[in-house]
Image: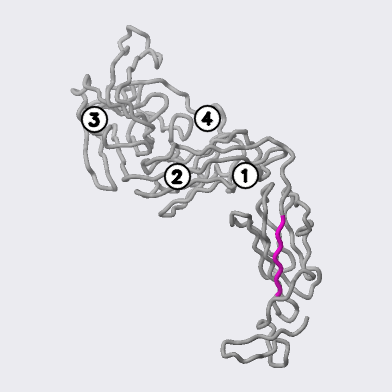
Amino acid sequence: MGCTLLVIALGAGVTACGSDGHPLSSEPYDAADQISFNTPVGDGRKVDPDKPLEITVKDSEGRITDVTATDAGGRYVAGELSADGGRWHSTTPLAAGAHYTVRVSTEDEDGAPGRKVLGFHTSRPTTKKRLNVTFGPDKGTYGVGQPITAELSVPVTDKASRAVVERALKVDSRPSVEGAWHWVDDTKLHYRPKEYWPAHATIRAHSNLSGVKVAERLWGGRAKPLKLTTGDRIEAVTDASTHSMTVYRNGAEINTIPVTTGKPGFETRNGVKVVLGKEYFVRMRGTSIGIAEGSADSYDLPVYYATRVTWSGEYVHAAPWSTGSQGSANVSHGCTGMSTGNAEWFFDTVRAGDIVKVVNSDGETMDAFGNGFGDWNLTWKNWREGSALVGGSPEGPRPQDRARLRPESV
């Protein structure tokens, strides 16, 4: 390597290779002869995206000090550098049909820096089978309990393939919070933070899966990014033993409402539920939950200001027929009933994603999945066990573990 003349800030010239020079003061040399790639790079041929990118030092008299690989969008390829600097390899898949730029920094046995920048294209997949992702819910403002969902167009059962998918599905929030994906089944994932989302947060979900090989003959496809915001932290806590609901906004109590919950045989589910939607009018019939028409428990009622918390028909709603029991007894068929005025106030106060929690009921705990959003009834440890990146089982819930849906009740 020849000597290089440097001009320092004062304008004096010194030679980097002279007796008074230092190798670190020299301009980086061309490291092309010092390193090698495991696949042809920079000669116009397409690189196979199925193979990890690997860079090694040709001899033992130098080492790699840094490698960055980015795609055309500026996204980085994760990689690992060996302790001795002799080898770097990528640890996340390359995308098919993409352009990458690799910047390699080295040093020789004297500590002088070398550098090489190369660009290459990956080949396109030979299959047309794509794994598309649909994020949910719809764009908008939600309560702090709203999970993010990801629906896959093709089932993914293998744990290694699930890990590829999960790494590519990104959720960011401002303020930032710790969160994780959980595989509900082979085609659906939910994402939630360790605790509820912060109030007035901005949440974005996007996929880096496009062009990435997920499994044999299966490649990542399209996904429309999602942006959500959260409103105030609204929590409604119903105590079935005291027949009352206390509503909090951002931790401060704003209302206490006398209610009635499920009577024996129709006990309201315990646990955290998330508001799914609001319906001004719902007609509820006892026959929809297996009550014989004409029996003592039969009913056919117009119901107003109905806030849904399960798909099977559990609501918080107006129940003017039970005002004499509200605050003193549980007489409903599973719903939380209150006066029409209180139900209207509740209906106007909450939005989808807000928290409705029931305590001290004799009912079972709300299922985590299958009947709405019971995600918060899993501990954080159990939630993370549903992630392919944490070590959970590659299988989804067994059919017998899924919620048995029940239609509307009052």
**Residue 408: image tag:** none
Q: Mark 2 points at which residue?
A: 227
- Highlighted range, magenta: 114-120
Residue extending farthest to the top is 294
Question: Left or right: where does residue 226 sit relative to residue 42?
Answer: left
The residues bearing labels 2 and 1 have C-alpha atoms spaced at a distance of 19 Å
Q: What residue type is labelled 1?
A: Ser
Please say whether residue 407 is one of the residues in the magenta stretch: no
Label 1 vs 3, first from the N-terminus: 1
Rendered view: 100 above or below 244 = below
SS assignment at label 3: helix
Q: What residue type is labelled 2?
A: Lys
Find residue 374 and report its image quarter.
top left
Image quarter hosting the N terminus: bottom right
The residues bearing labels 4 and 1 have C-alpha atoms spaced at a distance of 33 Å
Mark 2 and 3 residues: CB-CB less than 8 Å, in contact? no
SS assignment at label 4: helix
Where residue 291 appears, as percent x and y from the top left, is: 37, 13
Binning the other alpha carbons within 10 Å of mark 1 as few (below 14), some (14 to 19) or many (20 upward) gives many
Mark 4 and 1 residues: CB-CB less than 8 Å, in contact? no
Label 2 vs 3, first from the N-terminus: 2
Q: Which residue is located at x 45 percent, y 23 percent?
A: 405
Q: Which amino acid does label 4 sit on?
A: Asp
SS assignment at label 2: strand
Label 4 vs 1, first from the N-terminus: 1
Binning the other alpha carbons within 10 Å of mark 3 as few (below 14), some (14 to 19) or many (20 upward) gives some
Q: Name the residue under label 1.
A: 210
Find residue 31 and report its image quarter.
bottom right
Q: How many labels does the image show?
A: 4
Q: Which residue is located at x 77 percent, y 67 percent?
A: 35
The residues bearing labels 4 and 3 have C-alpha atoms spaced at a distance of 35 Å
